[in-house]
Image (tube, helix red, strand yellow):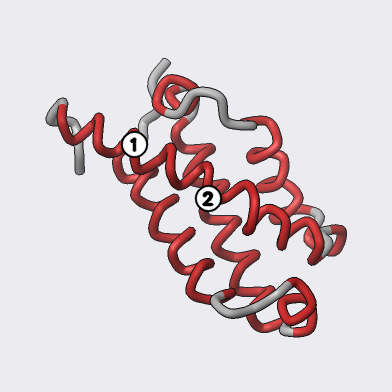
Amino acid sequence: MPSKYDPAASLAHIVENAARVDGYVAGMDRGGFERNRLVGDGVERCLGRVCEAVYRLGPQAETLMPGQPWADIRGMGNRLRHACDQISAEVVWGTVRYELPTLVFAARQALAKLDASGQSI
């Protein structure tokens, strides 16, 4: 069953929030990130939005962006919402540096495919 949310809008939300994260952590190393809780809080909020956008894609996520670690992404969203006291800066930093770029690349490709088929926002 397709999601009730516009997939192009959800994909755009992923790209937009990832760009915010990139701006927040620009020039930082992991130690700087761990020391700057203001940046850490902003990054966690944006990651929560990314996870919500993935949730809104529903079952279309795998079709639009195959091969992503969907269970991990949705799990992180749940932890950010319900167990935020158990999220380590190390995990967030690793997500930002190693996982988020792959997801954004796939989201941009999916947006381009939707746009080419006339299904964009």
Give the mark, 1 or 2, whose residue is nearer the N terminus. 2
Please state which of residues 17 and 112 is positioned toward the viewer in this rendering: 112
- Residue 87 position within the rendered picture, expressed as x and y whole percent measured from the top left: 81, 59
Quarter of image, res 30: bottom right
Q: CA distance from mark 1 to mark 2?
A: 12 Å
- Residue 110 position within the rendered picture, expressed as x and y whole percent measured from the top left: 34, 33
User: Which numbered tag is attached to residue 101?
Assistant: 2
- Tell me the crowding category of disc 1: few under 14, some 14 to 19, or many 20 or more residues within 10 angstroms, Cα based: some
Residue at 72% x, 59% y is 92
Residue at 59% x, 65% y is 45
Quarter of image, res 90: bottom right
- Compared with 90, 14 (above or below) is above
- Compared with 95, 67 (above or below) is above
Q: Residue furthest left?
A: 118
Q: Which residue is mark 1?
A: 109
Kind of residue at badge 2:
Pro
Asked if labels 2 and 1 touch by Cβ distance under 8 angstroms, the answer is: no
- Residue 46 position within the rendered picture, expressed as x and y whole percent measured from the top left: 55, 63
Kind of residue at badge 1:
Gln
Q: Quick one: SS at disc 1?
A: helix
Look at the image and tell me in which quarter the C terminus lies.
top left
- Tell me the crowding category of disc 2: few under 14, some 14 to 19, or many 20 or more residues within 10 angstroms, Cα based: some
